[in-house]
Amino acid sequence: MAEEDSYEAQVLTSQKRENGAGSVYYRKSDNRWCATLSLPSASDGKPRRVTRTAKTERAAKVRLTELKREREKSGDIPTAILTVSSWAQTWLRTIVEPDLRPNTAQSYRTTVEQYIIPSVGTKQLVKLTPDHVRLAVQYVTDKGLSTRTASLTYQVLSMLLKAAYRDGKVARNVADAVNRPRTKTKTLKVLDADDAIAVLQLASGERLGSRWAAAFLTGARQGELLGLELDRVGDVLDLSWQLQRVTWHHGCGGTCGKNAGTSCPERKVIAPADHEMRHLRGGLWLSRPKSDAGWRIIPLVDPLRTIIERRALVAAAETNPHALLWTQPTGDPLDPWADNNAWHDLLVRAGLEDAADGKVDKQINLHSARHTTVDLLYQAGVPEAIIQEIVGHSVVAMTRKYKSRGNRPQLAEALTQMSALMSPK
């Protein structure tokens, strides 16, 4: 046994200590004092301990006291070097994915893997500083990405550091010392009533004409309309499900050799246990709305009622394995990507967007149709609270909890007023 080992053993056994009390000893090999503390056994049953060093015996005793406090606070102390990258993956797997909706969790994972890990992933978690947070934000900015992406990167990094603090893995959330990046205000181009009427007149009689009429006359979101099933269409539109594209993950533990999760023989979708989903085809699923405000029933009034009834008759006679109101000609669900392309093609034909060399200058996104609906409702003199209920905004969510799910006669009257504005003269 080496001289220093013999000396250390003599020191460790010279005083009888109670179990878990820890110890302070001198290490001759590097002229350092050590504070060591036992930790819960590893998963394989092997004993674990953590050691911190100091120049003096007094400083080592302080280290031991700090270790005891940390063990008491969190129940454990990491013995391996924990990097931002390793903690971020743990955070995604154990905290984000079990609690958040699949698409939200996927957006966080994309932010972690594309921006946070490349910029500060190799840094030790406990040594992270506010400058490292700024570095992650600067990494996004230097790539020429939007201020919104930079702000999201800051938000996700702050969230994973907050979770690390709660778990006792860091002493503080250093992101709290950094201001969240400001986002540049984006001016959304919205169609006015005349533009909307021109679009509907152009699309009249086309396969998706009723789909665009529903967008303008209900203010419903893309997924809510694409996910409409025939048995939820009658005197009302029951917007209790929405169509979403969800990312597949490996279910094999990474052993199948496939790059993408969608090709894994044991592929799976990761979602909270209480999140209701129904698989349609490929990556397309029907999913419950994310809030009570989104789960709503809208009365059908003319002219939309007649338009929808005609479409429902056609959909019932077509090949339609999922019994959806709007489908591709093959009967498959209408993919949101294809739906967006059809929208911009319609706007080009209406002269509201330009196309050159086969590329469309996409200035008016499909979501802006909701803004048009709200504008028209205000023009029709519909009360604000009713507008919020029609389009499913959560601004008055607390008020909504104290009343029934919708005032059918009042909602019908509001939509009738708006439909009068939309009807071509």
Image (tube, helix red, strand yellow):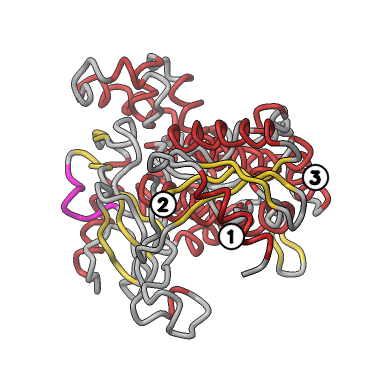
- Residue 138 marker: 3
Which residue is depicted at the point 61% across and 33% down? 61
Dot 3 amino acid type: Gln
Query: Where residue 398 sits: x, y (%)?
Result: 33, 17
Pick the front one: 7 or 315: 7
Label 2 belongs to which residue? 94
Left or right for 126, reference 210: right
- Residue 22 marker: none
Dot 1 amino acid type: Asp
Quick check: marks 3 and 2 in contact, CB under 8 Å? no
Q: Which residues are magenta?
A: 228-234
Which of the 4 image quadrants contains residue 404? top left
Placement of 396 over or under 74, stated as above or below: above
Which of the 4 image quadrants contains residue 43? bottom left
Left or right for 98, reference 408: right
Give the Cα distance between marks 3 and 2. Answer: 28 Å
Instruction: Tell me the SS state at disc 1.
Output: helix
Pick the front one: 328 or 160: 160
Q: Decide which of tag 3 and tag 1 comes sooner along the chain.
A: 3
Q: Decide which of tag 1 and tag 2 comes sooner along the chain.
A: 2
Pick the front one: 116 or 242: 116
